[in-house]
Amino acid sequence: VRAQPAVSSQEHVRWDPARGALDVPALSGYDAVVHLAGEPIVGRWTQEKKQRIRESRILGTRLLAEALAKLAKPPQVLVSASAIGYYGHRGEELLTERSAGGRDFLAEVCREWEAAAAPAAAKGIRVVQLRLGIVLSARGGALQAMLPPFRLGLGGVVGSGTQYWSWVALEDVVGAFLHALRTEALQGPANVVAPQPVTNREFTAALGKVLKRPTVFPLPARVARLLLGEMAEALLLSSTRVAPKRLQETGYVFRFPALDGALRHALA
């Protein structure tokens, strides 16, 4: 993000994290940087897939942070994506940014992902790591994958249905990034989730109600594990009950704090 025209007229900066290549001089003149890049986590987690998930986040963030730290006039703020996978499976425990991290694969990735921004912070750049929850969009992510069976009346709870899903409307994700760019008091990790986390059973009921479809076909945990392997355990069966404490402390007001309204908006 440039507030003032830069000396260079380039609109794109060449960046190849896998090869450690980044055009450092082309980064000059920017007031803020937003970093979202990373291998999608959806898909069966083979060893090769897990390596791409890890390296795309950690190596890319470290390369960017080190490049920004080399600038004579670095940007004022770096806002980098992270995820609530940082906390791991925690049952009904209410988690804030001060809660300890988990110990599973995603938790380790998130911990290293956030730590990779350290060179930028050491330079004096304000670094904000936004830990994203389940983003509600009909055009991608978990909600899009759920829609076909639910629209056919074949949806239902996953596993026991008691696991917490901490969700957030896409509009509030965008709002949180803008808030992080503008709010000097916000620094370090911040949970980007709606203030009303729900269980999978509650999420299932709300989606069925909005679509006006029954939700009587459960997906047993053993079947989810058979179909999706380790990814099912981490994304569908894991319970992560998260509160957006830092966003609310710094004045962010959610456009969609309740699930029913968020689903109706996402599904038009």
Image (spheres, grey):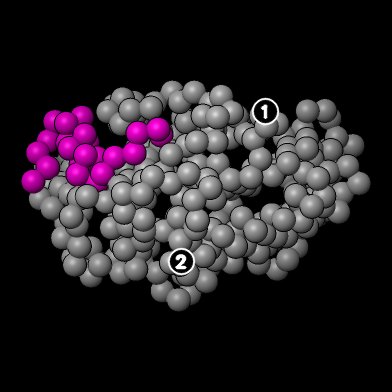
Identify the residue at horizontal 65%, vertical 64% (top origin).
59
Dot 1: element: helix
Amino acid at pointer 2: Arg
Relative depth, front residue between 203 and 189: 189
Q: Using residue 185 as the reference point, say whether residue 190 is left or right of it.
A: left
Residue 10 appears left or right of 184:
right
Residue positioned 50% across, 56% down in the render: 100
Tag 2 and tag 1, C-beta contact below 8 Å: no
Q: Residue, x 85% and y 35% (percent of image)?
A: 6
> How packed is label 1: few (under 14 Cα within 10 Å), some, or many (20 or more)?
few
Of residues 103 and 67, the one drawn nearer to the viewer in this rendering? 103
The answer to whether 187 appears left or right of 205 in the picture is: right
Residue 113's image quarter?
Answer: bottom right
Binning the other alpha carbons within 10 Å of mark 2 as few (below 14), some (14 to 19) or many (20 upward) gives some
The picture places residue 48, in percent across and down from the top left corner, at: 48, 74
Judge whether residue 78 can be spotted in this image.
yes
| The N terminus - image quarter | top right
The answer to whether residue 186 is above or below residue 232 is above
**Residue 11 visible in the picture:** no
Residue 239 in picture, x, y percent from top left? 32, 53
Magenta-colored span? 194-216
Element at label 2 = loop
Looking at the image, residue 11 lies above or below residue 236: above
Q: Which mark is residue 103?
A: 2
> Where does residue 224 sit, x and y in percent of width and height?
23, 63
* Disc 2 from disc 1: Cα separation: 33 Å
Which residue appears at 55% of the width and 29% of the height?
249
Q: The residue under label 1 is which amino acid type?
A: Arg
Magenta residue check for 206? yes
From the image, tell me which residue sits under label 1: 182
Q: Position of 147 compared to 197: left or right?
A: left
* Residue farthest to the bottom, as pictured: 47
